[in-house]
Image (cartoon, grey):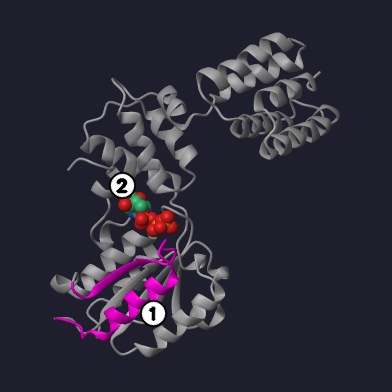
């Protein structure tokens, strides 16, 4: 199968879902039962909410899962009325070859409060024939009457070691030639989001030859931490022109955005202060200057000029 690896390597069964072990154990109790309560899956992006819902539906509804399953996105561009009409039409029909039907509704936290109240009425109306699995990033955005009608499952970011293991598994399946620290770099940038990690690996694999750490920095369009550190050192020691050259290289040649640059400079400076390599008298005014540049860049000021001005504040 060609196409996106996130689909190619989407687990088909509950056992194959990475991490989330306590959730999977609880969910297995619903398999082989005559009914299932409404469920709410909440947590950050790319950690397996949709994947787990699909795997659960397949093991509960068995070979007739397609006929008895409806997947909808609550922020459907055609509007919430279309979503509700689809739910109504689906729930009116009797289950085929299975005891009940399941509706998976993604991005419920994007629904207005009014739309959520309407959804709650539908959940009540069809309790005998259908169960809902609602997915959202923030359960706090969901009205209480819906939360109290659902068993809530909180998905956590995937642990670094689990992300690394999964990436290595995929890399081996795809016969990729890679350096180990390239995997570590992907884990660092993915921040527990396995979808992002797999997409980064696939993007890095589209180039020729061995996948190196440098290739990952190119793919994420972020500057190498060492280049940032060299630039900061030059600025701190009065080599403004040298620092400016490194800044230009990172922004023009590597395509690092102004917002990413300012963030990476902040991380470098803070690391120095935490390790006792920069005095408070130097660190504190610098943070203020970094905050000002960050604000101006976000407001639309020219990032290159703002960052060059920031470098002059390091002396
Ligand atoms: N826990 C996991 N185990 C295995 N693969 C995963 C896991 N989480 C994410 N993935 C990979 O990332 C892809 C996207 O995951 P999924 O759609 O389940 O994320 P999600 O949590 O529903 O995210 P969103 O909140 O953005 O909808 C999957 O197709 C799979 O390849």
Q: Contact (CB < 8 A) between labels 2 and 1? A: no
Q: Residue at x 16, y 81 (%)?
A: 96
| Up-down relation of residue 299 to residue 94 (above or below) | above
The residue under the point 44% across, 39% down is 187
The picture places residue 179, in percent across and down from the top left corner, at: 35, 25
Residue 10 located within the stretch drawn in magenta? no
Residue 95 falls within the magenta-colored stretch: yes
The secondary structure type at the circle numbered 2 is helix
Kindly report the distance in space between the C-alpha atoms of the residues bearing marks 2 and 1.
27 Å
Circle 1 packing at 10 Å, graded few (<14), some (14-19), many (20+), is many
Q: Which segment did they paint magenta?
A: 67-96
Residue at image x 57%, y 25%? 225
Specify few, some or many for label 2: CA neighbours under 10 Å numbering under 14, 14-19, or 20 or more.
some
Residue 269, percent across and down?
A: 70, 29
Residue 58 visible (yes or no): yes
**Disc with the residue nearer the chain's start (2 vs 1):** 2
The residue that disc 2 covers is 6
Q: Relative to 109, is 277 on the left or the right? A: right
Q: Which residue is mark 1?
A: 38
Tell whether circle 2 marks a residue whose Cβ is less than 8 angstroms from ligand 1.
yes
Q: Relative to 245, is 69 above or below?
A: below
């Amino acid at each position: 199968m060609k196409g996106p690896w996130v689909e190619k390597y989407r687990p088909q069964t509950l056992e194959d879902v990475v991490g989330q072990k306590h959730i999977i154990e609880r969910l297995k109790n619903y398999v082989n039962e005559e009914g299932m309560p409404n469920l709410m899956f909440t947590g950050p992006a790319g950690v397996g909410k949709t994947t787990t819902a699909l795997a659960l539906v397949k093991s509960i509804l068995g070979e007739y899962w397609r006929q008895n399953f409806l997947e909808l996105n609550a922020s459907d561009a055609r509007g919430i009325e279309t979503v509700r009409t689809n739910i109504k039409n689906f729930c009116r029909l009797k289950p085929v070859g299975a005891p009940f039907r399941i509706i998976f509704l993604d991005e419920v936290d994007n629904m207005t409060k009014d739309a959520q109240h309407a959804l709650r009425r539908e959940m009540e109306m069809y309790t005998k024939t259908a169960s809902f699995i609602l997915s959202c990033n923030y359960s706090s955005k969901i009205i209480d009457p819906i939360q109290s009608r659902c068993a809530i499952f909180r998905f956590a970011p995937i642990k670094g070691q689990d992300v690394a293991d999964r990436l290595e598994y995929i890399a081996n399946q795809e016969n990729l030639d890679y350096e180990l620290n390239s995997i570590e770099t992907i884990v660092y940038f993915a921040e527990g989001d396995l979808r992002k990690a797999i997409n980064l690996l696939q993007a890095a694999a589209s180039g020729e030859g061995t996948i190196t750490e440098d290739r990952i920095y190119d793919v994420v369009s972020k500057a190498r931490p060492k280049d940032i550190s060299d630039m900061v050192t030059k600025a701190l020691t009065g080599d403004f022109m040298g620092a400016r050259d490194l800044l230009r290289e990172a922004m023009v040649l590597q395509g690092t955005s102004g917002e990413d640059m300012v963030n990476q400079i902040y991380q470098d400076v803070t690391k120095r202060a935490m390790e006792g390599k920069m005095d408070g008298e130097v660190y504190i005014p610098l943070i203020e200057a970094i905050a000002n540049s960050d604000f101006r860049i976000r407001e639309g000021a020219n990032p290159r000029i703002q960052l060059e001005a920031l470098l002059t504040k390091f002396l």
